[in-house]
Image (cartoon, coloured by chain):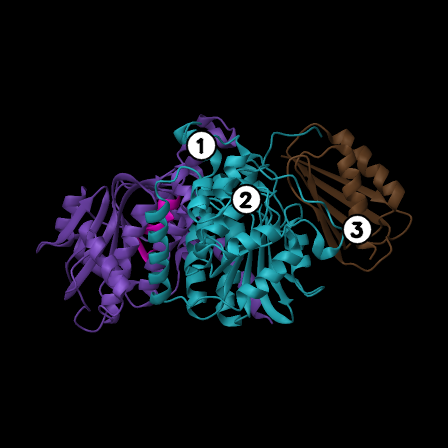
Chain colours: A brown, B cyan, C purple
Amino acid sequence: MESLTFRHATTKALPGAAPHAITGVVASGNLEILLERVLPPDACEVAVETPIAGYGAVWAAVVADFVARVQPGGLRISINDGGARPDTVSLRLLQGARLMER
Amino acid sequence: MPASTDPDAVLSGGDEAGPPPPARATARTGMSWYEASARQRVAALCDAGTFAEFLGPTERRTSPHLPLFDLPRAFDDGIVVGRARLDGKPVLVAAQEGRFMGGAFGEVHGAKLIGLLRAALQVRPAAVLILFDTGGVRLQEANAGETAIAEAMRAIAALRAAGVPVIGLVGGRAGAYGGGGLIAGTCARLAVSESGRISVSGPEVIETNRGAEEFDSRDRALVWRTMGGKHRRLIGGADAFCDDTAAGFRAAALDLIARAPAFDLATLEAEQARLAARIARFGDCRDAAEIWARLGVNDPDAVPAMEAAAFAETVARVEEAHHDAR
Amino acid sequence: MTLAEILASLFPDGHAVRVADGLIGGDGPFAEGQATVIGVDGDTALGVEGALALARAVLDAVRVGDGARSADVDAGSARESARKQGLGAGDDRGAVGNGAKAPILVLVDSDSQRMSRRDELLGLNECLAHLAKALLLADQAGHPTVGLIYGHSAAGAFIATALATRVLAALPGADPSVMDLPSVARVTKLPLDKLQEMAKSTPVFAPGLDNMVATGAVHAVLDPGKPLAGQIRALIAEAAAEDVRDRLGAARGGRPVAQAVAEAVAAAALRG
């Protein structure tokens, strides 16, 4: 298993009041994402556990793109990966953010 | 992040064995049960907004063992447990996630079910609902999983004896295989959908041990005939057959709670007679279609493709389907 | 120990326990009353017929213990058929002197469940669950249920027999397992030598008696050098009212978190 952690500063807090949300399932080609509103409003952290080693740069790019688009300030995001493709990861991150905005 | 080798192919007796998925409906309770996740099933089954999870994902009670095998963990270890209301009545609910490790019983997964069942003895809900979706024991935690299955059966027997109905719903991707099939057989009542396969040995397990002549696991039609929901309903192995929707399972659960049998000598004597009669009458049949013909089904070959309404009419004419001591 | 040696040690005054087609049935004088004996011998796989035959004998013992003799014509004829198979015991069994019900001993040296198309077609899950339920009902009715594994057992057969008793004992050399390591290697796609290495430090997945003891599934390992009857009587006397297997698993280290997780869930459920 490879553990990766990415920390980003955000310009604003993610709107909404949901304290936490979960989306996705740990399965082949899929992943689960747990989002928790526990950080300062200008910070976001994404922690990844993946059985597929050596894709740190790809994860970094996907996470950076998500943070830039959504500005998920205040969120700690924890990912259990089952070997998902980058587009699946992006989709799930956006789904998770939407759940937190409720 | 390429596709990995399939980490959830463990003992998932007949995964990917589904019939063509039914047309998807968007309504909350109309979604395909087979396609839905455990969380989606619970939310859609119970009264809207009433589900409260115990030991939810933020608690991070993950498997201490999977990392040894370089396998990813899930925050809920593949089972969702909690309380909710069903038609206003309090219920306790457990739902397995068949896509994570084939829904198999690991140490944490099993212990969450055990905790729920034991608490139910004091909480006295209107029912305990178990949403099965499991290939059986998680091999990486096999001893813990096997023991948890025995603990679950003991706890269910105690609950039933205390008058709390324990209702099983089987319609997930992984079915109810291995020890999951034995727990299902311990429940007071069972509802199945067409996708709800119930067995002990999965098709691949039989083929591996006995050869493809005994059971060709790639013959999906054979798998469905032998282990699928329609066969189980026709021979009396399940008490209700429902559409592959949360609404279907909800209606079935409400109906079954109201007619849960006692757990006593009379019930088990009746079950003994029921099962002995089944073996005496169908023990020489090689295929489910032969059994259905002997049950009096006019066109057994038409059963697999039968729509729910037509199947319900067929079931109504089969006496064995109404022998429901369990 | 062989089954014959075990029976001789359990019933020094003789017994009426027979084996037919790998299925054990009968009874013998035990403590101040009679004990019912069922089980599986000779590494036999448990199929639909075997499960029902064993369940028949258990339900008969419950009926006798309830004092509800011959109240049910169906049960009477079923008991007759069970006796023809050498499984049923006589009607003269009864309570053990002081009002305690007759023990039911489950002796196990089995294969796994019988793996066949026919067994699944006929509802093996129902038949195995029925046997387990019969044992659980007997336990609820006050019959001490004690398992004794003296050989192999695995998977569904293990769950339906030995694991459905209140107290499970083992003899040294017993070999309970869920799946053997070569099969685990196939399914997990891990090399066998790595699994063998992991098995030394990780009881949770590895086959064998020591690991099942550590998990809490097996309560005690008996001493074959001493009379088994006394050891079984002591286990019955000490048996806890509740299911202690997760507590044992935590204390012995074979299931490090199960008890704590179950208690956390139960506590949340009880918080109303």
Front position in the image: B109 or B304: B304
Label 3 with label 2: CB-CB less than 8 Å: no
The amino acid marked with disc number 3 is Leu
The amino acid marked with disc number 1 is Phe
Label 3 with label 1: CB-CB less than 8 Å: no
Task: State the CA–CA distance, disc 2 to disc 1.
Answer: 21 Å
Chain of residue at mark 2: B
Chain of residue at mark 3: A
Residue C166: in magenta span: yes
Q: Position of residue C193 (x, y in %)?
A: 44, 26
Q: Is residue B192 visible?
A: no
Q: Nearer the viewer, mark 3 or mark 1?
A: 1
User: Which numbered dot is residue A75?
Assistant: 3
Q: Is residue B68 above or below residue A39?
A: above
Secondary structure category for the residue under label 2 = loop
Q: Position of residue A78 (x, y in %)?
A: 71, 45
Q: Is residue B272 visible?
A: yes
Q: Position of residue B251 (x, y in %)?
A: 62, 62
Q: Quadrant of the C terminus of chain B?
A: bottom left
User: Which numbered dot is residue B215?
Assistant: 1
For label 2, the residue is B303
Write down the region rendered in magenta.
Answer: C156-168
Between discs 2 and 1, the one toward the N terminus: 1
